Amino acid sequence: MTIRGIDGDPAPLEPGTRVPVQERARRWIAETLELVVPGGRLVVFDYGAPTLELARRGTWLRTHRRHEAADWLADPGSCDITTDVAVDQLQADHRAERITTQAAFLERYGLAELVAEGRRIWAERAAVGDLAALRARSRVAEAEALTDPAGMGAFVVLEWRSPDTAEPSSS
């Protein structure tokens, strides 16, 4: 089987190399882009890396039971299985307009302002301890988790523009 990467180019893998194959996910991208309204975007968040990086790492498949690492062969069917997404394979038919981390994506779309507002509300209402204060404090803590570069902040974000959207002018 040939694994297609960006623009359909084959990923050069050694025989016997094990990597996730994202054929169905690639088709889902193509099908979903057809549903995106002109001017709209498809945005995908997940943990992932290019196929060759996943092949080098060899740790793209993970299993968990009760929030701890588990061996799926020890008790088949008893744990959750997850895999990194081979982001180049998702782009075999449609190249993403932008690829970034979740942390950078959230910063781009105004997370810093929301966190600053949360800190301000917390400072004003912490002594009151009402729901507004707790929500504000939660906003700050959640933002820290969502942007942690060693955790969820490292998730990959891919953005595709609707195929019916005109390219931005270069002038």
Image: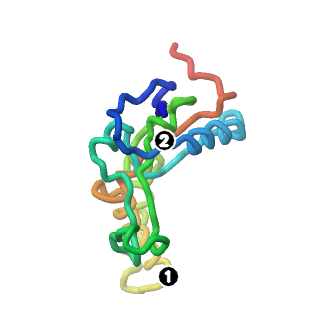
Residue 51: image x %, image y %? Answer: 38, 38
Residue 18: image x %, image y %? Answer: 37, 45
Q: Residue at x 55, y 45 (%)?
A: 43
Given the image, on which type of amino acid does mark 2 rest?
Answer: Leu
Q: Disc 1 versus disc 2: distance between alpha carbons?
A: 35 Å
Q: Residue furthest front?
A: 16
Given the image, on which type of amino acid does mark 1 rest?
Answer: Leu
Tag of residue 131: 1
Residue 122: image x %, image y %? Answer: 39, 74
Residue 99: image x %, image y %? Answer: 43, 38
Q: Is residue 107 visible?
A: no
Q: Residue at x 56, y 18 (%)?
A: 169
Q: Residue furthest top?
A: 171
Residue 40, picture quadrant: top right
Give the mark count: 2
Residue tagged 2:
158
